[in-house]
């Protein structure tokens, strides 16, 4: 399935127990739209989400260690919400549009050249919180 989305390429094959085992390497971070994400098996969705969260935490820790989180222009918020299904979907659509706009802004920056360019990271999480026991 990831091969269908051009996220992996076949590196080699090896015979194993009467079958052919395929070995792949990542060619791109999956940037799947909502429809593509839904078609992935739930286990793969969980694995990809876990990898993304792990990478985000590692990058955040490195930024903290370097003092980058002391920047007065950093944007850092945590907003627990109470939403119905309609609001959940509406907010998810807004976040998808925000992601698209962020990529467009990055493309504009790249078109201007490399002078004054610095690495940033945008992490957006919107998830259903675990149910709490009262």
Image (cartoon, helix red, strand yellow):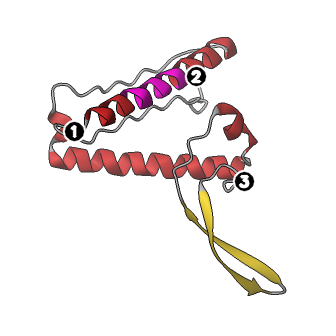
In the picture of the structure, the residue carrying the numbered disc 2 is 92
Lower sequence index among marks 3 and 1 = 3
Q: CA distance from mark 3 to mark 1?
A: 35 Å
Residue 5 rendering spot, x and y as whole percentages = 66, 49
Look at the magenta stretch and give its main secondary structure: helix
Identified at 58% across, 33% down, the residue is 130
In the picture of the structure, the residue carrying the numbered disc 1 is 117
- Which secondary structure, mark 2? helix
Residue 44 rendering spot, x and y as whole percentages = 66, 52
Within 10 Å of disc 2 (Cα), the crowding (few <14, some 14-19, many 20+) is some
Judge whether 93 appears above or below 121 on screen.
Answer: above
Looking at the image, which is closer to me, 49 or 98? 98
Q: Is residue 24 a member of the stretch shown in magenta?
A: no
Identified at 52% across, 53% down, the residue is 28
Taking the image as shown, residue 33 lies to the left or right of residue 78, namely right
In the picture of the structure, the residue carrying the numbered disc 3 is 1
Task: Please report contact status of discs 3 and 1: CB closer than 8 Å, yes or no.
Answer: no
Looking at the image, which is closer to me, 117 or 113? 113
Q: CA distance from mark 2 to mark 1?
A: 30 Å
Task: Please report contact status of discs 2 and 3: CB closer than 8 Å, yes or no.
Answer: no
Q: Which residues are magenta?
A: 96-105
Query: Closer to us: mark 2 or mark 3?
Result: 3
Within 10 Å of disc 3 (Cα), the crowding (few <14, some 14-19, many 20+) is few
């Amino acid at each position: 399935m990831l091969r269908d989305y051009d996220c992996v390429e076949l590196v080699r094959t090896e015979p194993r127990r009467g079958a052919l085992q395929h070995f792949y390497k990542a060619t791109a971070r999956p940037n799947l739209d909502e429809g593509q994400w839904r078609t992935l098996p739930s286990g793969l969705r969980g694995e990809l989400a876990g990898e993304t969260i792990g990478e985000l935490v590692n990058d955040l820790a490195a930024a903290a260690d370097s003092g980058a989180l002391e920047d007065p222009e950093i944007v850092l918020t945590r907003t627990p919400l109470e939403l119905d299904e309609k609001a959940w979907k509406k907010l998810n659509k807004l976040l998808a549009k925000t992601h698209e706009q962020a990529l467009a802004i990055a493309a504009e920056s790249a078109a201007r050249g490399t002078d004054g360019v610095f690495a940033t990271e945008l992490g957006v999480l919107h998830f259903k919180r675990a149910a709490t026991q009262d």
